[in-house]
Image (cartoon, grey):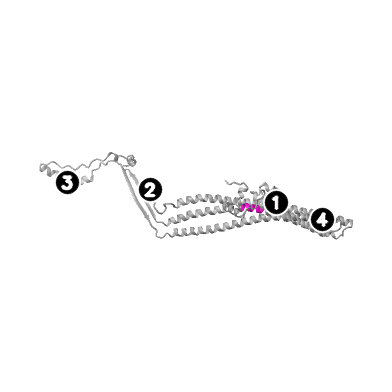
Amino acid sequence: MTYTRPVLRKRLIDRERAQIRIRSKQVGISETDFELRVIDVVARVEQAYWDLVAARQAVQVAEDGVKLGQEQLARTERQIAAGTLAPVEISLARSEFERRRDSFYATQDILTAAENNLKLLMANGRANAVWNEELVPADAETTGKPEAEELGAVVQTALAKRPELRLLSQRRTVNEIEKELNRDQLKPQVNLVAGYANSGLAGTLSTAPNPFEGQSAGIYSRLNQLSGLAGLAPVLPPVQGSLPPFLLGGYGSALSNVFTGRFPTVQVGMQFELNLRNRTAEAALAQTAIAEKRLGLERTRLEQAIDAQVRNALQGLVASRERIAAAEASAKAAEEKLNSEVRLFQTGESTNFFVLQRQNELLESRRRAVVAHLEYNKSAARLEQARGRTLETKEIRLR
């Protein structure tokens, strides 16, 4: 068993631990990125939906314009037939009628393009059944009618909820981990090392003569001859002793000696490694410092962009409401003027020019109302997106 304890470099962080921490943060980054993609898809679908609503309303206005032109053409024909109107008046009425028919077919093309754009976002392929269906919007105006809140409160909510800022914070955390790792790489490597080992030894006793005893055999023989001539007792070689039983045996005895711990070895020491200038670590640390500054500037830019988005959405919401009220009031007044002009025309006190002009004023007021409603719906959607509440408002949960 060997134990190594870093004292300076790698004591708190190393590449393996850094990668584990970075990977755990990247899971959150992937989830936030997925949330942003879902928000983008929802926002594009919602904008396409309101485009379709406005396109259908524009078609209805154009169709009403054709009907008004047809009615005026019929009135003109009747009065010409009755002799109360000059025949030249028919040209103006017919020309305006055909122009409105042309506008009607142009709005039909816009409606088809808006419908196909929404289908493109909804369908998962050319074989989807939605391509063969007509899309009829269920709601003509956003539900809930969001109120224009105080700017400061909305901005604070947006800064707290926007996933873009959360993604930036997660990226900054990853950069901090890399910065900590690179700073640690500049330290010298000092390790405390401790080791403990057990050895096992065993074998079979050899029957061959001891080479050390063989070297002394001649000396002992000569000495004993001289001892016999002198009447002395013979000198015997020293006894070397016997091996302990645990050293006698095969592989099993050696393995047993390992686990009984008869021959332990303990080592304690210190390892030291010094790199006077780690240019690789210095360059990596400089890159993380640059990335940190860049992320800080990116956060400042993003916060400013969010502030501008909230301001634009709130202003668009307020302006759209006023435009709706103005357009509806204008349409009501234009309709009253048209009815009055038609009565004058029927009594011979007005002309085709004035009647058609009043009709165009009415149609233009209604078109402005359609555009105002479209901008209101889009501004409401943009406000929810700016506040970071798109998924919450649509009750969408990501798993």
Give the Cα distance between marks 4 and 1. 32 Å
Give the residue displayed 61% in from the left and 48% down from the top. Answer: 392
Q: Earlier in the sequence, mark 2 or mark 3?
A: 2
Give the Cα distance between marks 4 and 2. 101 Å
Residue ID for mark 2: 3
Residue ID for mark 1: 53
Taking the image as shown, residue 125 lies to the left or right of residue 31, namely right
Label 4 element class: helix
Contact (CB < 8 A) between labels 2 and 1? no
Residue ID for mark 3: 219
- Which label number is shown at residue 340? 4
Residue 22 horizontal/vertical position (percent): 49, 51
Label 1 element class: helix
Q: Earlier in the sequence, mark 4 or mark 1?
A: 1
384 falls in the magenta region: yes
Which of pointers 2 and 3 indicates the residue nearer the eye? 2
Give the Cα distance between marks 2 and 1. 72 Å
| Kind of residue sitting beneath label 3 | Ile
Query: Label 3: few (<14), some or many (≥20) within 10 Å?
Result: few
| Kind of residue sitting beneath label 1 | Val
Give the Cα distance between marks 3 and 1. 124 Å
| Kind of residue sitting beneath label 2 | Tyr
Q: Which residues are magenta?
A: 378-385
Residue nearest the viewer, comparing 280 with 295: 295
Q: Earlier in the sequence, mark 4 or mark 2?
A: 2
Residue nearest the viewer, comparing 229 with 298: 298
